[in-house]
């Protein structure tokens, strides 16, 4: 049944709660809805849920829909153009409710790369195909043996340059190559912008933000189910051994009394 057709008669929610729910989930993607369904199932199985006063649906959904990742933007810039493009991406991401951090390349700790989920590099080229001064050490680090594997990282690169130079947008190309060699996955192809870059940069910005929004919250997220709550599932729920609850389990690991289960689409 579609949510817009849902009535108080056909669900355990009252009309006001259904209205709240419809409003709250209106803008969510199918992946986010699937994530929320798994999150609420885990929540319903905790002891606190049994006697808890229900929190407003909007607040609960907002908590559940909190993206699993965040966006980090790094600029490599000599005279400010790349910095400007990076700042406008930061502002647009903030307006879209994405958690975002902006760094000059020389303020960024390269060892933090391993913790990133989504990285955007906006890089101009200086000298004869050289990185700008603020990005020399990051450029060196990424091609060194110290660079970590980045298989979980999703990234995008915008290069700024001038096609009258022999090594057009070389620094952007280098960063793209380094990240890809370390196992990171491009969410959109790199673009190399010439001197009139504003229009291309603006189109790229909306493309990147779209891709970030698709992937930042859509991945599997961890729901922590305390073991003692899991053991009461039969008593508290309509599901039993004979009528099992069907869900796809992505990973399952046990640590200090909790089962950490990664949720994905729930098929019941
Ligand atoms: C001294 C100098 C050297 C440059 N070398 C290159 C180059 O090798 N390749 C390239 O594509 N662009 C080159 N450019 C063009 C810049 O990358 C381009 O103007 C860019 O928009 C500057 O961005 P920024 O202000 O962020 O540094 C050079 C520009 C200057 C002033």
Image (tube, rainbow, N blue to C red):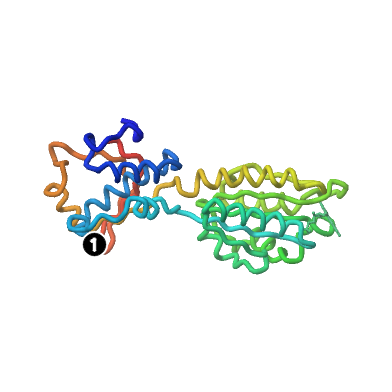
Nearer to me, 194 or 12: 12
> Looking at the image, which residue sits at the far front?
16
Which of the 4 image quadrants contains residue 107? bottom right
Instruction: List the residue tagged with mark 1.
Output: 257
In the rendered image, residue 44, in percent from the top left (x then y), is placed at: 24, 51
Q: Position of residue 260 (x, y in %)?
A: 31, 55
In-image side of 154 versus 224 (left or right): right
Secondary structure category for the residue under label 1: loop
Q: Residue at x 65, y 42 (%)?
A: 189
**Ligand 1 quarter of the rendering:** bottom right
Instruction: Give the residue drawn at x 27%, y 51%.
Output: 42
**Residue 200 percent across, percent down from the top left:** 73, 43
Q: How many labels were placed on the picture?
A: 1
Quadrant holding the N terminus:
top left
Residue 229 image-quadrant placement: bottom left
Residue found 19% across the figure and 53% down from its top? 230
Q: Position of residue 50 (x, y in %)?
A: 18, 55
How would you rate the neighbour count of disc 1 (Cα within 10 Å): few for under 14, some for 14-19, many for 20 or more? few
Q: Cβ of disc 1 within 8 Å of ligand 1?
A: no
Residue at the right extreme of this rendering: 164
């Amino acid at each position: 049944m579609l949510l817009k057709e849902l009535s108080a008669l056909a669900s355990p929610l009252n009309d006001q709660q259904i209205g709240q729910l419809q409003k709250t989930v209106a803008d969510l993607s199918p992946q986010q809805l699937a994530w929320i369904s798994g999150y609420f199932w885990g929540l319903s199985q905790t002891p606190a849920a049994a006697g808890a006063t229900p929190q407003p649906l909007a607040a609960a959904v907002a908590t559940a829909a909190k993206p699993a990742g965040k966006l980090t933007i790094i600029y490599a810039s000599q005279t400010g153009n790349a910095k400007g493009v990076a700042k406008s991406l930061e502002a647009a991401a903030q307006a879209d409710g994405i958690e975002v951090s902006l760094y000059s390349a020389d303020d960024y700790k390269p060892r933090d790369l391993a913790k990133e989920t989504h990285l955007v590099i906006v890089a101009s080229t200086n000298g004869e195909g050289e990185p700008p001064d603020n990005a020399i050490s990051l450029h060196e680090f990424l091609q060194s043996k110290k660079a970590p594997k980045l298989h979980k990282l999703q990234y995008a690169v915008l290069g700024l340059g001038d096609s009258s130079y022999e090594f057009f947008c070389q620094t952007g190309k280098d960063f793209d190559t380094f990240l890809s060699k370390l196992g990171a996955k491009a969410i959109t192809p790199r673009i190399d912008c010439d001197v009139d870059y504003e229009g291309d940069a603006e189109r790229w910005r909306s493309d990147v933000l779209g891709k970030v929004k698709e992937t930042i919250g859509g991945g599997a997220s961890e729901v922590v189910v305390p073991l003692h709550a899991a053991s009461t599932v039969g008593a508290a729920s309509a599901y039993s051994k004979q009528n099992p609850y069907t869900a796809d389990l992505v990973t399952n690991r046990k640590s200090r009394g909790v089962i950490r289960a990664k949720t994905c689409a729930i098929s019941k």
